[in-house]
Image (cartoon, rainbow, N blue to C red):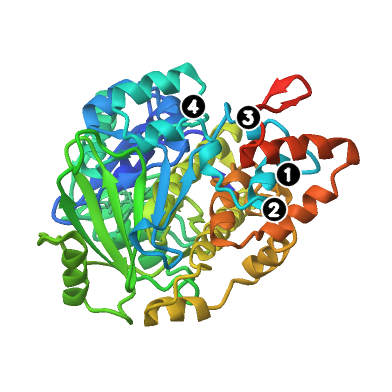
């Protein structure tokens, strides 16, 4: 049992996005008598390559009582409404599909029956894309300004839910200022060692000849992975057999248009893909690639040939896709990059970190600071389930038609995780359902990707074929067939409106 009913000091190692969000959270949940200290090594620095959040970013700001407008203003964040995938089906630059952050306000999502969305299935059956049914897509396509988008989102009819593109350096520096103003103690030092007692609890941190006693520790030390990795030596669950990318070369680009684009671009390249994250003042970009298929110099040359101009690459980042099986041991929890990382496809890193943190808070608050071993085991199990969902979702993106280079041919041969192979078999027969993916969500946790997210990727890649959608539509009760036909007529342009149960679809 972990007893944090009367702690004196809780500490965080690391001053990146994970560390400062953790500091704000601990400051909020512990009484003012408890010291919350964050220690960061200025000589190591943080990761900041132009990041994109998921939908739980806004929840995390709200939970921490940070006004979203202030966050946007202080960090230069720009709207992010989803992703565009370019060239993943082998069709070059013009070949785009979209994964949008869809929400309330999409008429096609209002009819749900037998676990699926008949009108989305009708679109797939008719060979139509899914993104055009999101009313706000028109604003994305014409590159609406931030102000226009704000008004559209506020009106609640765009069918879109917003997250943000941001620069982690500016986010960490803003969160730091807020956390210090709320009483978090900030120390600059490089931790040399975690000092453990006989039972494996971390009792103090050693640095520069000093010792700092702690009752609870969040290890947010990034890729240094000082706690759960180096000190506790826990088992790494590698995804490198199915997710082949292991290097990233970040760089900056000027914004090509007057308004920052509203989507993250994921451009397929010869040995991986290039992210472009539009911020207010520039684009954060990078090529994430497989070192078995291309070296750094060739990667830079390929980027420059694609863009038509030279770039100033920043340091190359190396990583292995995966996570620690156990991220919470006794009184230490690893958070953010210190606990795991996969390539930035679908921007899962900060999303997963915030969900971990929400659950650390839930467990500590609901348990009144007293946490049983089983609860810690449940946390670890749920965290691993969440990572398995991320792995399978990402693996599906590579289950794509592009095959023109050795990398894309090797990707096609890379094994499917068993769970994805099973899902794919189901998706060949019918569209994704919540029952397919709820196993990725542990008790008390919230899923990062939902059915519609899976549909936005599975359908354009052909993982859900049109025939599967036609079959499931035929199984609907006969009295609904006229509604489906009317919708198909609408899509075919032979009708102008569909009414179902009094609700206008278009
Ligand atoms: C190529 C790439 C692209 C990415 N794109 C996205 C994206 O689009 N969306 C997304 O959500 N995320 C993305 N990420 C991940 C995202 O950048 C990180 O998850 C996020 O910045 C949080 O990082 P962190 O706080 O865990 O670690 P870091 O930012 O690395 O911070 C680590 C901290 O630990 C400190 N530290 C390390 N060792 C010690 C020590 N011994 N003593 C004291 N302090 C120490 C360092 O000084 C630093 O302050 C991307 C990452 C990479 C590599």
Is 314 situated above or below 300? above
First-in-chain label (3 vs 4): 3
Q: Pointer 1: what residue?
A: 116
Question: Where's residue 118, x and y in %?
Answer: 73, 42
Say whether mark 2 is within 8 Å of ligand 1. no
Rounded to the nearest angstrom, the CA distance separating label 1 from label 4 is 22 Å
Name the side, left or right, on which 421 lies relative to 218: right
Crowd rating for badge 3 (residues with CA inside 10 Å; few <14, some 14–19, many 20+): some
First-in-chain label (1 vs 3): 3
Q: Secondary structure at mark 2?
A: loop
**Count of numbered badges drawn on the protein:** 4
Whether residue 66 is visible to the viewer of this picture, yes or no, is no
Q: Pointer 4: what residue?
A: 158
Comparing labels 3 and 2, the label whose residue is closer to the camera: 3
First-in-chain label (2 vs 1): 1
Q: Residue at x 25, y 58 (%)?
A: 286
Q: Pointer 2: what residue?
A: 431
- Which residue occupies the foreground of this view, 469 or 265? 469
Crowd rating for badge 4 (residues with CA inside 10 Å; few <14, some 14–19, many 20+): many
Asked if disc 2 and disc 1 are in contact, CB closer than 8 Å, the reply is yes
Asked if disc 1 and disc 3 are in contact, CB closer than 8 Å, the reply is no
Q: Secondary structure at mark 3?
A: helix
Q: Secondary structure at mark 4?
A: loop
């Amino acid at each position: 049992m972990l007893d944090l009913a009367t702690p004196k000091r809780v500490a965080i190692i690391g001053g990146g996005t994970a560390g400062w969000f953790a500091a704000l959270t601990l400051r909020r949940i512990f009484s003012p008598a408890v010291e919350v200290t964050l220690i960061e090594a200025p000589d190591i620095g943080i990761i900041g390559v132009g990041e994109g959040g998921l939908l739980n970013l806004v929840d995390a700001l709200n939970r921490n009582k940070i006004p979203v407008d202030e966050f946007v203003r202080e960090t230069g964040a720009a709207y992010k409404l989803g992703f565009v995938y370019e060239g993943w089906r082998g069709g070059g630059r013009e070949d785009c599909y979209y994964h949008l952050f869809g929400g309330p306000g999409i008429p096609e999502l209002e009819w749900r029956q037998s676990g699926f969305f008949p009108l989305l299935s009708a679109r797939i059956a008719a060979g139509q894309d899914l993104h055009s049914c999101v009313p706000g897509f028109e604003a994305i396509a014409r590159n609406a300004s931030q102000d226009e988008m704000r008004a559209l989102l506020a009106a609640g009819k765009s069918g879109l839910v917003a997250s943000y593109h941001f620069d982690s350096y500016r986010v960490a520096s803003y969160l730091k200022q807020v956390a210090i103003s709320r009483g978090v103690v900030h120390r600059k030092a490089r931790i040399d060692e975690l000092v453990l007692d006989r039972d494996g609890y971390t009792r103090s941190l050693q640095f520069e000849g000093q010792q700092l006693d702690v009752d609870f520790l969040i290890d947010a030390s990034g890729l240094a992975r000082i706690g759960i990795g180096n000190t506790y030596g826990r088992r790494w669950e590698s995804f490198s057999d199915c997710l082949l990318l292991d290097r990233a070369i970040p760089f900056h680009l000027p914004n090509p248009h007057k308004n920052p684009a509203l989507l993250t671009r994921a451009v397929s390249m010869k040995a991986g893909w290039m992210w472009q994250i539009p911020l207010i003042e520039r684009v954060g970009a990078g090529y994430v690639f497989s070192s078995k298929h291309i070296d750094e110099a060739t990667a830079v040359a390929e980027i420059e040939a694609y863009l038509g101009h030279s770039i100033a690459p920043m340091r190359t980042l190396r990583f292995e896709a995966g996570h620690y099986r156990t991220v919470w041991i006794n009184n230490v929890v690893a958070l953010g990059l210190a606990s795991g990382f996969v390539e930035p496809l679908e921007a899962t890193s900060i999303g997963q970190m915030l969900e971990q943190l929400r659950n650390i808070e839930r467990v500590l608050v609901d348990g009144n600071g007293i946490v049983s071993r089983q609860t810690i085991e449940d946390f670890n199990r749920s965290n691993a389930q969440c990572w398995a969902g991320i792995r399978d979702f990402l693996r599906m993106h590579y289950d794509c038609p592009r095959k023109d280079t050795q990398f894309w041919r090797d990707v096609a041969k890379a094994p499917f995780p068993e769970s994805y192979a099973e899902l794919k078999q189901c998706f060949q027969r019918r569209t994704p359902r919540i029952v397919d993916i709820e196993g990725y969500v542990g008790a008390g946790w919230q899923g990062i990707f939902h059915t519609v997210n899976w549909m936005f990727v599975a359908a354009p890649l052909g993982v859900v074929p049109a025939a599967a959608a036609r079959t499931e539509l035929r199984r609907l009760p006969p009295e609904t067939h006229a509604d489906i036909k009317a919708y198909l007529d609408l899509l075919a342009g032979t009708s102008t409106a569909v009414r179902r149960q009094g609700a206008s679809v278009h």
